[in-house]
Image (cartoon, rainbow, N blue to C red):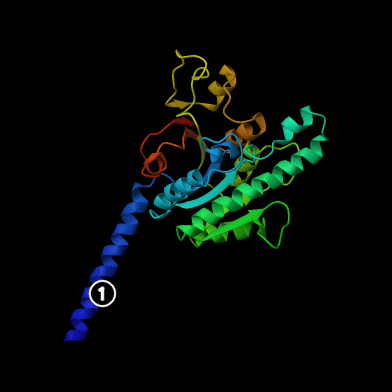
Amino acid sequence: MIFFKQAIKGLKKLSYLWLLENFQKKIMKYKRILLKLSGEALMGEQNYGIDIHRVRQYANDIKEIHSLGMEIAIVIGGGNIYRGLSAEKSGMDRVQADYMGMLATVINSMALQDALEKVELKTRLLTAIKMEQICEPFIRRRAVRHLEKGRIVIFGAGTGNPYFTTDTAASLRAIEINADAVLKGTRVDGIYTADPEKDPSATRFDEISFTEVYERGLNVMDMTAFTLCQENNLPIIVFDMNKEGNLKKLANGEHVGTVVR
């Protein structure tokens, strides 16, 4: 008799967990996302490098949406450490400078991986340039399998090719893994008619089409990255990553920032 009572109690608990999990999946607007972070975002209030407190904040925000059942891939820029395009202007060979920038993205990716693992999230770093001692090489099927197993996947080293930005890498990887959207975390809360830091009369768009972004000449991503998203019907959401709770609101289907579709 005691055995049957325990069995019934166990079944009730399993049923409750199953219902909770499926309810969370239903309210989620996106099942699989690619989060794009700039290298500068990792600086916090510093002028250079990595602010570990900011990285830990991001890790906690990511953990919140991961607990809802969302599959998360991440691409990080390297501008807080090294920017290839800027180095070219000072006389360095562009190809060499771009490869240095790719290595900077790997440093940032490793910092975020460490922070995510500190909050007990299984994380895999896959890079477009082979570095077997510290990460896995990028293989599309392997990346998808990691996501299906509930692991966070960070893509490092851009596309592995010079002349391509990390925005382009984010768009490309998002398409390859069949992400539902690219979430571009920035310092501003969306796309404006003009730069809000320079023009106080600038107004924010709640939603805007790819075509209108082109026509207005708005700076969302570089043209290659933006065109990839447009041609593959991949929405871009531009939002303020530094505002606590924004990422969770997006995961729950609430309107945050600006949607480009």
Secondary structure of the residue carrying tag 1 is helix
Amino acid type at image mark 1: Gly
**Residue occupying the far front of the picture:** 46
Q: Residue 67 versus residue 140: which sits nearer the camera?
A: 67
Q: Identify the residue shown where x is 59% and y is 45%.
A: 75
Q: Identify the residue shown where x is 42% and y is 42%.
A: 247
Q: Is residue 63 left or right of residue 105?
A: left
Q: Residue 246 versus residue 144: which sits nearer the camera?
A: 246
Residue holding disc 1: 10
Relative height, residue 210 to residue 106 (above, below) = above
Q: Identify the residue shown where x is 50% and y is 51%.
A: 72
Tell me where residue 171 appears, x and y as whole percent: 60, 40
Q: Residue 117 versus residue 191: which sits nearer the camera?
A: 117
Tell me where residue 225 appears, x and y as whole percent: 63, 35
The picture quadrant where one finds residue 217 is: top right
- How many labels, in total? 1
Tell me where residue 248 appears, x and y as whole percent: 38, 44
Location of the N terminus by quadrant is: bottom left
Residue 176 visible at all: no
**Residue occupying the far left of the picture:** 1
Neighbourhood count class around disc 1 (C-alpha, 10 Å): few under 14, some 14–19, many 20 upward: few
Tell me where residue 110 appears, x and y as whole percent: 60, 53
Q: Identify the residue shown where x is 83% and y is 35%.
A: 93
Residue 209 visible at all: yes
Relative height, residue 134 to residue 204 (above, below) = below
